[in-house]
Amino acid sequence: MATQQLATWSVNLQYANLTAPVIAAAVTSLYNWAGCAIGGYQQPAPNLALNATFPHFGGAPTSSILALANDSTQTDAQIAAFVNGIAGHVDDYDDTHLATIIHPTGTVASALFAVAEWQGGVTGQEFVTAFVAGVEAELKLGLAVWPEHYDVGWHDTSTTGSIGAAVAVSKILGLDVPTTQQAIGIACTQVIGMQEFFGSDTKSFHIGRAAQGGMIGALLAQSGFTSSLQGLEAQFGWVHVVSTRENVTAEFDQLGEVWEILSNTFKPYPCGIVMHPSIQGAIEVQSAALGQGLRIQDITSVEAKVNPETLVLTGQTDPETGLEGKFSVYHGIAVGLLFGQATPSQFTDSVVTNATVVALRKLVNVTTDSTINEDEAYVSALFQDGTNVTQHIEHVIGSIDNPLNETQLKDKFMGQASLVLGEERAGKAYDAFMGIGNYRRRAQIFAEIRRIL
C-alpha cells in the first residue's frame, strides 16, 4: 500500500542514511530557497498575504517571516508557513526538479521552519533529515503521475508539495507510521494549484497554501483527527483522482535508493525555466554583437528556435505585468538583448511595459522544433547592416549538465538577501544557512538565524 510504504520509509529514515551528496544537495536547496524568500518579500504578494491574515487570524507569535526576523515580527506557524511559502516562490527564482518541473523546496521548507521554530527541540541534523523526507516524497509522487497530471493543468509543485510538507512535519513531530498515514491523507484532500493562475499572485499562493495545508495535516493527525490510511492509492484517492496514469508503488520502491534531490537544479533567471535557454542565448547575442561594434537599437528582427514546451508554458506574447513577463519567452529574449542580464529587476511592471522593451519584444519570432532539448535554444538577431549574430545554447546554465557553481549560488543568495539585509548581514545569513546541518544544540538554529536576520 503506497501510503503506508511512504510513511514507513519516512519514519525510519535517519540522518545516517543520507549520503554526503544528498546532505549537500539539501543544504544548497535550503539556502537557495532562503535567499529567494528573503528577497521575494519585497514583492507585493507576501505583504498582501501577511496584512490580510495576521491582524485577523494570527495566534500566538511563535514563528518568523524570514525577511522580517530581525525586527522581531513573528506570527503563528500557519501564517509564517503561508507567507514564507509565497515569498520564496513569487519571483519564480527558486529551484526546479527538471523531470517534473516541481519546485520542491518552498512548500517543505516553509512548513518545516514554521513548525520547528514553534515547537523547538530540533537539531540541524533532524531538520535536514525531515526536509529530505518531504522532498523525496513530493518528487517521487510527482514522477508517479508525470506528465498526465501536469498536462491536464495541475500545478504539480503545490499538488505534491502539500503531501511533502505533511511528511516532513510528521517526521519533525515524531509521528508513528499510522499517524503519518493520516497526515498524508489530510494533505491529499487539500490538493491545490492550477496552471490557469500562472502569471498572477495566485501562483505563489499555491505554494504558501500547500505548505500550510501539509503542516495542518500533520498537526491534525497528531491530535487524533482521522483521514484515510490509503489516501494516495485508494480508488478515489489522490493518484487516481488527479491523474489518468500512475506508478506510485514503483516510484516508492526506489525511496532511499534513487535520491531525487540530487537532480534538483537552481535557477539563474527569475522566470519559467523553459525560457532560460532563450534568455542565455539573447544575453550571449548581445555580448557578441557589442563586441563587433553593433548597436542593439539597430536590430531589425530576432529569431529563436526552442523546444515545444517553451511556447506551451511561456508563450505570452504581450505581457502587461512583471509576473506575466515571467511566462513570456518574448520578454525574456528582449531583456536579455537590452540589458545583458535577467534579474528580478527585469521582471517588474515598469520594465514589462517600457516602450523600448515592448518594441524589441515585437521583433521576436519564436518557432519550435521537437529535436531541440528543453535546456537548448538557438537565438539570432539581424541588424540593419545585414549582420546576423547567432548563438546556440546547448545546455543552459543552471541545467543538470551545466549547473550553477558554488560561487554563482552564493552570488545569487547575496543578490537577493542583501536587498533586505544589507551586504554584511546577508553574508552572515549565508554562513548560517550553509551550516544548517551542523547545529547540535536543540533550537540553536532558529535563535542564530533570527539573530543574524
Image (cartoon, helix red, strand yellow):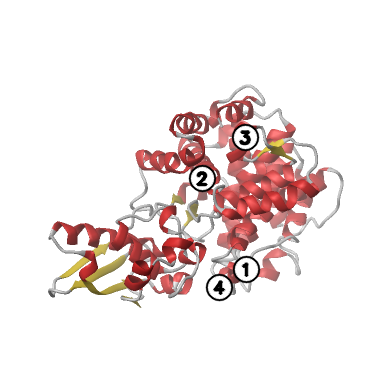
Ranked by sequence position, the earlier of labels 3 and 2 is: 2
Q: Disc 4 designates what residue? A: 151
| Residue pointed to by mark 2 | 39
Residue type indicated by callout 3: Ala
Give x and y (percent) for residue 187.
73, 55
**CA neighbours of label 2 inside 10 A, class few (<14), some (14 to 19), many (20+):** many
Label 2 element class: helix
Badge 1 density bin: few <14, some 14–19, many ≥20, Cα 10 Å: some
In what element is the residue under mark 1? loop
The residues bearing labels 4 and 3 have C-alpha atoms spaced at a distance of 39 Å
User: Which residue appears farthest toward the top when viewing the image?
Assistant: 441
Residue 274's place in the image compared with 262, above or below, is: below
At x 71%, y 55%, the residue is: 3
Q: Which residue is rendered at x = 63% and y = 26% of the image?
A: 447
Depth check: 172 or 177 in front? 172
Residue 194 is marked as 1
| Any part of residue 137 in sight | no
Q: CA distance from mark 4 to mark 2?
A: 31 Å
Asked whether residue 154 is in view, the answer is yes
User: Helix, strand or loop at disc 4?
Assistant: helix
Q: Nearer the viewer, mark 4 or mark 3?
A: 3
Residue 335 placement, left or right of 60: left
Residue annotated with mark 3: 69
Nearer the viewer's eye, disc 1 or disc 4? 1
Q: What distance separates the C-alpha of mark 3 from that of mark 2?
A: 13 Å
> Mark 2 and mark 4 in contact (Cβ < 8 Å)?
no
When the figure is inspected, residue 185 is found, relative to residue 73, above or below; the finding is below
* SS for dot 3: helix
Amino acid type, label 2: Gly
